[in-house]
Image (spheres, grey):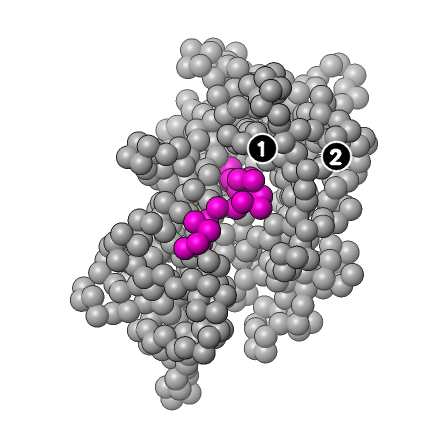
Amino acid sequence: MSETKSVAVVGAGIFGLSLAVALRDKGYLVTVFDRHAYDETQYDPAADENVQAASFRASYGTKLHYQRLALESRQEWIAINKSSGIDLFVPSGMLRVQPSDELGALEKETLANMERDGIRETQFVKSLAEDRKRAKAQGWEGKLLEFPIPDSTDAGTYEAVLDSLGGFMRCSHACLYFQQLAASKGVGFVFGNQRGDVESIVEEAVGDKKKAVGVKTKDGIIHKADLVLDLSTHLESSGGSLATFKIDKDNKALWDKYSPENFPVITWKSTPRNKTGKDTGSVYVLPRTPDGLVKIGFRGIKVRPESSCGLFFSLILRQQFTNFQPAPEGVPFAQDGKWSIPMSPRDSCTIPEAAVDSIWQFVKIFLPEFDQVPFHSTKLCWYTDSLDNSFVIDYVPTYTGNSLFVCTGGSGHGAKFLPVLGKHAADILQNGDKATSFLRPFWRWRPDAPRRNGLEDGPDCPRNIGQT
């Protein structure tokens, strides 16, 4: 195509960077706007001591499309690691610990899909002798860890599946890599809380509809574009809680135990899914970073404390909180005129007591040697959630001429798709229903999507910390 078609991309995160690279490869003139000064910070989360990381999984139960996208992305990560010499993806493996001594329903669905795709041999079920034998032969046996079930009368342990395809990615380093890649291809970037902060979409009336013709930044400048890519429409936010602890490098036992070479990503479904299929709680922990930080995340509202907690590494407690505030006029998915949005960094430094309490049961079971040590720091981490956990990548039907396109809704599982997400999105942008991407049916604009992530509970829910 001709390079005369210009695109304004709002947001220089996972979705914006991936799509900017893909569109530039297709010949578009691309400019990315972001209010953060990433040109100065280089995506370095200095305040968080490099705790920025995300788990990598291909386990999606019946959602075969996301499983296949994850495998496609993993191949790209391996290639990028090799070509760049940087370990942006760390294939440490992932141990999926079950809620009991048997495989849960979601795990059975996942293994069935792995079998369907011919990759069952990459999975090692702890209780199966043949799987343990394969794990030993391939060097994975040391990561098939045993965890006792509390108050078990027969000294039982939790069932677990080790996924040799899993691991984690270093988000900040990955974003910097793709931003520099995009810039090298000719993508323009406008950063800063005035120059790069998009205040509004510039519209023109076309009959009884409107057309997006550019963006207006906070400094009052209008940037014309043939197409606007908005990365914030059709979203609400939920907050996870972060608390950090740090391993002292001189503590060789802990340093070695939690290294990516010796320790897998661990996920634990604290309770099985209920009859409606809704997940009621899950936890994950990542190996330590080169700085000695380990990341634990918690999702759910069920568990309560049984002991106090502390350790010399980073904990990240992920519980879904909301911050409902008055919504812009005309937003179709508001509740009682409100939607959940992120709190400011200053207001996100303290985590709710419920989040602090929720982690204790996990620590007692999985990290019993790390009790009674104060947190190193705390903060809330806000997630960009679609209303149903699946991405929204499509043209906005209320705008004419295919002038406004959305690519958004990471919902806590988008980061690992960075190398390939933009390719599928760009295919949909160019071709609509004629796109070859197998993800087209799953990412359509859907204003009536059901709320999840705790968003369904609305402004009156106890987890709405915006009302306190």
Q: Position of residue 186 (x, y in %)?
A: 26, 58
Residue matched to label 2: 374
| Residue depicted at x 33% and y 71% | 227
Q: CA distance from mark 2 to mark 1?
A: 15 Å
Please state which of residues 81 and 431 is positioned toward the viewer in this rendering. Answer: 81
Extreme-right residue of the structure: 306
90 with respect to 288 (left or right):
left
Q: Which element carries disc 2, helix, strand or loop?
A: loop
Please state which of residues 214 and 218 is positioned toward the viewer in this rendering. Answer: 218
| Residue depicted at x 72% and y 50% | 350
Chain part drawn in magenta: 38-57
Three-letter amino acid code of the residue under disc 2? Pro
Q: Residues within 10 Å of mark 1 (few under 14, many from 20)?
A: many
| Number of marks in picture | 2
Residue matched to label 1: 293
Q: Look at the picture and state if 142 lies above or below 439.
A: above
370 with respect to 80 (left or right):
right
> Going from the N terminus, do you reach mark 2 or mark 1 first?
1
Quarter of the picture holding the C terminus: bottom right
Q: Quadrant of residue 1?
A: bottom left
Q: Magenta stretch: residue 465 in it? A: no
